[in-house]
């Protein structure tokens, strides 16, 4: 807990970023497909950034607090799952709190919290398990 191991950061950070951005992009598409029209590219970039920043900031805190980048996180699937899902749950809570301010779009809906918890965990865990399986084989 409370650590960032450089080797683990190199192993997972870029993929974690892609997983979180994919989660946000899918969510935005589900709620506002009009933004994905070519004429809306500028609005889309602003909307995606506004939606992603709270969760990315939350992931930085949650992943650090729960050891998702710890030295031994990939030693077992259970440890990987616990640190990843736990870190994402912290990220989700913090992201929801930030989204409920006037500075970012969105709110802190309990339904969205549950959806974000489930699907954010799924995106991150699927990537991390795949990466660990491939890199450790």
Image (spheres, rainbow, N blue to C red):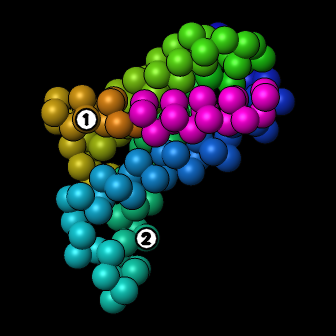
Image quadrant assignment for residue 10: top right
**Gap between marks 1 and 2 measured at Cα:** 23 Å
Determine if residue 104 is in view. Answer: yes
33 is higher (above) or lower (below) than 78? below
State the image coordinates of residue 16 (x, y, percent, origin top left).
59, 41
Q: Secondary structure at mark 1?
A: helix
Quarter that holds the N terminus? top right
Q: First in sequence: mark 1 or mark 2?
A: 2
Q: Nearer the viewer, residue 36 or 101?
A: 36
State the image coordinates of residue 65 (x, y, percent, origin top left).
57, 17
> Of tags 1 and 2, which is closer to the observer?
1
Q: Residue furthest right?
A: 7
Magenta segment's dominant SS is: helix
Residue drawn at point x = 53 percent, y = 23 percent? 84
Q: Which residue is mark 1?
A: 115
**Left or right relative to 127: residue 136:** right
1 is higher (above) or lower (below) than 124? above
Q: Which residue is mark 2?
A: 45
Residue drawn at point x = 37 percent, y = 86 percent? 38
Is residue 58 shown in magenta?
A: no
State the image coordinates of residue 50 (x, y, percent, origin top left).
39, 57
State the image coordinates of residue 17 (x, y, percent, origin top left).
58, 47
> Label 2: few (<14), some or many (≥20) within 10 Å?
few
How many numbered marks appear? 2
């Amino acid at each position: 807990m409370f650590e960032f191991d450089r080797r683990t950061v190199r192993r997972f950070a870029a993929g974690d970023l892609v997983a979180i951005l994919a989660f946000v992009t899918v969510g935005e598409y589900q709620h506002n497909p009009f933004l994905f029209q070519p004429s809306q590219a500028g609005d889309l970039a602003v909307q995606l950034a506004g939606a992603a920043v709270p969760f990315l900031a939350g992931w930085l805190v949650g992943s650090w607090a729960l050891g998702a980048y710890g030295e031994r996180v990939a030693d077992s699937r259970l440890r990987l799952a616990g640190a990843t899902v736990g870190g994402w749950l912290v990220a989700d809570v913090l992201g929801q709190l930030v989204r409920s301010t006037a500075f970012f779009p969105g709110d802190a809906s309990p339904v969205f919290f549950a959806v974000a918890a489930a699907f954010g965990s799924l995106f991150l865990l699927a990537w991390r398990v795949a990466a660990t399986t491939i890199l450790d084989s």
